[in-house]
Amino acid sequence: MSNQRSDMQRAIIQVSGPEPTKFLQGLVSNDLGRLARDGIVYAAMLSPQGKYLADFFLVAHQGSILIDVAEGVADDLVKRLSLYRLRAPITLERIAFPVSRGTGPAPDGALADPRHPALGWRAYGVDLPDDGTDWDALRVAYCVPETGIELIPNETFILEAGFDRLHGVDFRKGCYVGQEVTARMQHKTALRKGFVTVSIVGSAPIGTDIMAGEKVAGQVFTQADGKAIAYLRFDRALSHMNAATAQIVWDAPAQPA
């Protein structure tokens, strides 16, 4: 089992008006054209400097769009969206709307989690009991960062957080806030830093520095079943490191010949 629990306290922001898709399309990292096909899109809102502010699911609902976001960043997200509303006839409203998730048989109307098939489904408007899924173990196994643990507003870059792998960014959609920085990072030959799954013997508090000899090579975050999500500087990381008293083992990907 894990030593921290993923937070399922979610807020729902309803975006309504004549053209909610058009309003959001220039603000988020993914292409909302996918809503017509999938009914749900995973995306982030970035600062003009290209840094993460919030990640969320966008869900089509009766002519409006629901933003399913962590409770801890919901109020700030509403404020930021309001700044971009200007004179557009758009309404932003937090509403009471239940969110459920699971990895077993999906109930009617549930939507597949767009980040990874192993993350199961999400259902809106129904309050279903917990199905016992160890969400932290799944997140660690598939290196899925979470708001407030690995994803820190005004610090994280979404490509270092794997948003391309998690289907949370579209490189062909055109301009959105923070797009230029994200595009420049995407065109680099390789990222120098990022989140990876490592093996861990023992445990360490979230945010503990990972030491490669005398150098800080990163930090360790969520831990479960002998694995952990770690943020590493790849030029400093070694196959064997430590985080306080915990031992860290990283199987670095093979470099092309």
Image (tube, rainbow, N blue to C red):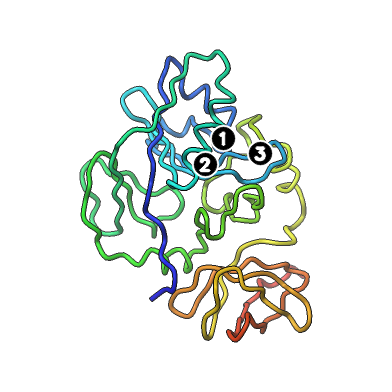
Proximity of marks 1 and 2: CB atoms separated by less than 8 Å: yes
Count of marks, rendered view: 3
Q: Is residue 83 above or below residue 179?
A: above
- Say left or right for 34 vs 221: left
Quarter location, residue 81: top right
Q: Residue at x 50, y 44 (%)?
A: 73
Residue hosting label 3 = 47
- Say left or right for 76 vs 102: right
* Secondary element at image label 3: loop
Residue count near mark 3 (Cα–Cα under 10 Å), binned few <14, some 14–19, many ≥20: some
Residue kind at label 2, given as amino acid type = Ala
Nearer-the-camera pick, 229 or 95: 95
Residue hosting label 2 = 43
Residue kind at label 1, given as amino acid type = Val
Label drawn at residue 28: 1
Could you give the CA–CA distance between mark 3 and mark 2, rounded to whole angstroms? 14 Å
* Secondary element at image label 2: strand
Nearer-the-camera pick, 244 or 116: 244
